[in-house]
Amino acid sequence: MHRRFKAWPLMALALLILPVQAQQIQTSNQIWSAEVIRSHGQPVIPLFDGWYPNADGSKTICFGYFNMNTDQALDLPAGDTNYLETDYPDLDLDAVLLPTHFDPLPPAYRHVFCAFTITVPEAFGIDHRITWHLASNGQSLSVPGKVIAPYVMDEPASDGRGDVAPVIQLSADTPPTQGRTGLIYPQIMQTRVGEALALSARIDHPDEEVWIGWAHHSGPGPVSFSDREYSIDSRTRTETELRFSTPGDYVVRLQSIDDIAAFEFYCCHSNAYYRVRVSE
């Protein structure tokens, strides 16, 4: 039996023999590249994390973000570079706690999960959208929030993973909260530039330990924390001390989860927010 071999075209043989040369662009000059996480100069990516139904028929949409810089924090005030829009009529977006400060990339869990939520009426359907727009470091990005089935999340517990969100109580006078919708502390905290302000909360969870993360959510100037991210014994109070360098109105975000590895499964963490007014 004879085997027939197909002749290779001369051009194909030449490509096998000769090295292929392509234009190389330095990473520092690339708008987008495989090296997307850098020390500075990269954008903040708005993220739609998903949504969950509520007992009253309403739905809650979750947005998070990914600061692709390891060192550079970005401040994007609400306005042309940081805004929400929707095609749903009469939906008030002005009351949303829109983040305006974006800390550098958290190395342990990469993106900030469900930094804020928007609750929409039962009539908000699968064809409606809430879009978050962010423009930073020369790039304008946006993401639509939607209530379609593939993006539904377990809240505040996951039967499949046997996980549950911590319960947060901000003070003896406020009700406990559990889950990503969270609770806003009813009073506006008052402090002065350079003075220490203590914020605390009680955390309850079936596990022995829980993770705590404090963050500068919005406000015009830098905020320093005595403790930002740590683990504590559950069923105890946690506290951090803040100092502000610039007068203005701020929001401080508290997040808690049993273990930061659980963030990757999109369940189950809790949010809480403090409003702070800083004077000279």
Image: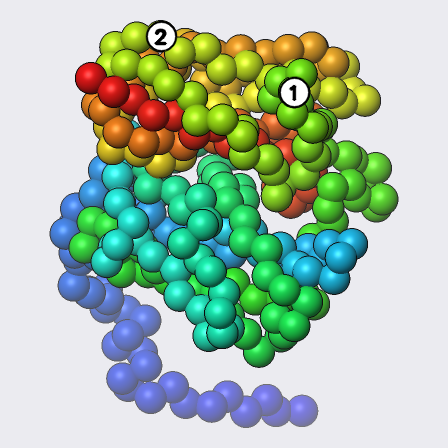
Mark 1: few/some/many CA within 10 Å (<14, 14-19, 20+): few
At 74% from the left edge and 41% from the top edge, which residue is drawn? 156
Whether residue 24 can be seen here: yes
Q: Could you say where residue 252 lies in the image, as x and y percent from the top left?
A: 43, 28
Residue 103 shows in the view: no
As drawn, is 270 to the left or to the right of 248? right
Front in this rendered view, residue 223 or 195: 195
Going by the numbered disc 2, the residue's amino acid type is Ala
In three-dimensional space, the C-alpha distance between marks 1 and 2, rounded to whole angstroms, equals 23 Å
Report the side of 177 relative to 76 (left or right): right
**Which quadrant: the N terminus?**
bottom right
Q: Which residue is at a point 23% across and 58% down the rendered structure image?
A: 80
Say above or below: 52 vs 231: below
Residue occupying image coordinates x 40% and y 11%: 197
Q: Secondary structure at mark 1?
A: loop
Residue occupied by mark 1: 173
Residue type pointed to by label 1:
Asp
Query: What residue sits right under mark 2 in the picture?
Result: 196
Location of the C terminus by quadrant is top left
Q: Quadrant of residue 33?
A: bottom left
Which picture quadrant has residue 17? bottom left
Going from N to C along the chain, the mark reached first, 1 or 2, is 1
Please give the label number shown on residue 90: none
User: Is 278 or 61 nearer to us in this picture?
Assistant: 278
Q: Nearer the viewer, residue 36 or 206?
A: 206
Place of residue 48 in the rendered image (x, y in percent of width and height, measured from the top left): 51, 56
Q: Residue 209: x and y, percent?
A: 70, 16
Residue 79 is situated, as x and y percent measured from the top left of the image, at: 26, 54
The residue that appears at 26% across and 38% down in the rendered structure is 74
